Amino acid sequence: MKKVISVVGARPNFMKVAPIHRAFEKYPNIEHFLVHTGQHYDKNMSDAFFQDLEMPHPKHFLSVGSGTHAQQTAKVMVEFERILELEKPDLVIVVGDVNSTVACSLTAVKLHIPVAHVESGLRSGDREVPEEINRLVTDSICDIAFVTEESGKRNLLNENYPEKNIHFVGNTMIDSQHFALRKLAGNNVLERLGLTSKGYVLSTVHRPSNVDNKEQMSDLLDIFELISKRRTVVIPMHPRTKKNIENFGLTEKLESIENLVITEPLGYLDFLNLMKNCDFVMTDSGGIQEETTALGVDCITIRTTTERPSTIELGTNILVQPNKNDIEKAVNRYLSGDRKDGSIPYLWDGNAAERIAEVISNRLSESK
Ligand code: UD1
């Protein structure tokens, strides 16, 4: 029997790992379980996803919580090392680019435990964004690189990563989307929020570069106001954004805007349903760029760069520089119905996790 641990820590990890767990159920000689670092701990940033994605409870919960980057990363490392000493797994799977991803990779490789990185090779080229550092470090030490798109493979080869360890398998986040689309029939989020299909714009912003600066945050509120004159704007608000709006004294400004529907962070099914039925999305998220591309829903991404170029080259995503003038222009264009066409990137077909499980199973049987 071989033992494989998948690490989850923050919200965007859950949908990437759920299909991997399901795929391993077909391998009776592999014991697969989850370790949750507790980077995200609020009920609606974490628990809701386990239910919606039908994931088993993690075997270990590390309760790491928030802190500075160094504090959070260090705490994850100390706690995860204890779990690795206890469980002695044959392989660790990490996904995405959050602090838990880099912390657990580093801990495992130092104990000579092989690490597989799912969503490897993505690069924005912007080292001021914390996730870019997490991606660079994780990829430079992982043993198996699973890539979601063509650029991932290209970037790894440019960094001299061994080609034999790169596997272009597709996107497990889209596996979860396929799984959840089949469960949407009973979801009533539109009724609950008083919305009609295509009658609203869905927006999420939480990147430090957009919400940690008062002027930028205030400009974004002006953009919400602009959109709200033509459509309802639905904003499931990330705790970081909420806290900053309060700390910057912008709560009154936010509350003065009519036609906004502000909610707590939503569960996976609610959010998917909102994405599927909205007129368009405005975001700074990594994953939502991919999810909208897979759904064929228009998406404006407010960032200087993206690590997911296939969503722009092939998909429905456009990148808009994070200044008021450029965002206004893009929003006005989209409100007047001027949009772009998109197609779905190669292997975003709902079966990526099965390919991953097969590669890992083969690798573990070689290492008998
Ligand atoms: C993290 C990831 C980011 C991902 C995002 C999704 C890193 C570096 N960043 O950013 O890539 O897009 O998750 O949400 O790993 N907080 C709560 N409750 C929670 C979690 C956080 O209130 O359950 C608050 C805390 O005040 C915390 C702040 O949100 O300080 C930020 O949380 P943190 O985990 O540091 O980063 P995110 O901005 O969530």
Image: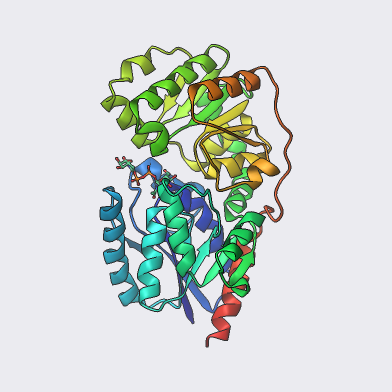
Residue 63 at what x, y percent from top left?
28, 55
- Can residue 149 be seen by looking at this rendering? no
Q: Nearer the viewer, residue 352 or 302?
A: 302
Q: How many marks?
A: 0
In the depicted structure, whether residue 310 falls above or below residue 252: below
In the depicted structure, whether residue 37 falls above or below residue 214: below
Query: For ligand 1, which image quadrant applies?
Result: top left
In which quadrant of the rendered view does residue 35 lie?
Answer: bottom left
Residue in the image at 53% along x and 45% along y = 287
Residue 122 at what x, y percent from top left?
55, 54
In the depicted structure, whether residue 67 falls above or below residue 73: above
Residue in the image at 48% along x and 47% along y = 126
Residue 209 at what x, y percent from top left?
41, 36
Residue 1 at what x, y percent from top left?
49, 82
- Can residue 11 be seen by looking at this rendering? yes
Residue in the image at 62% along x and 61% along y = 153
Q: Nearer the viewer, residue 276 or 226?
A: 226
Residue in the image at 31% along x and 30% along y = 244
Q: Nearer the viewer, residue 354 or 363?
A: 363
Relative to 301, 256 lies left or right: left
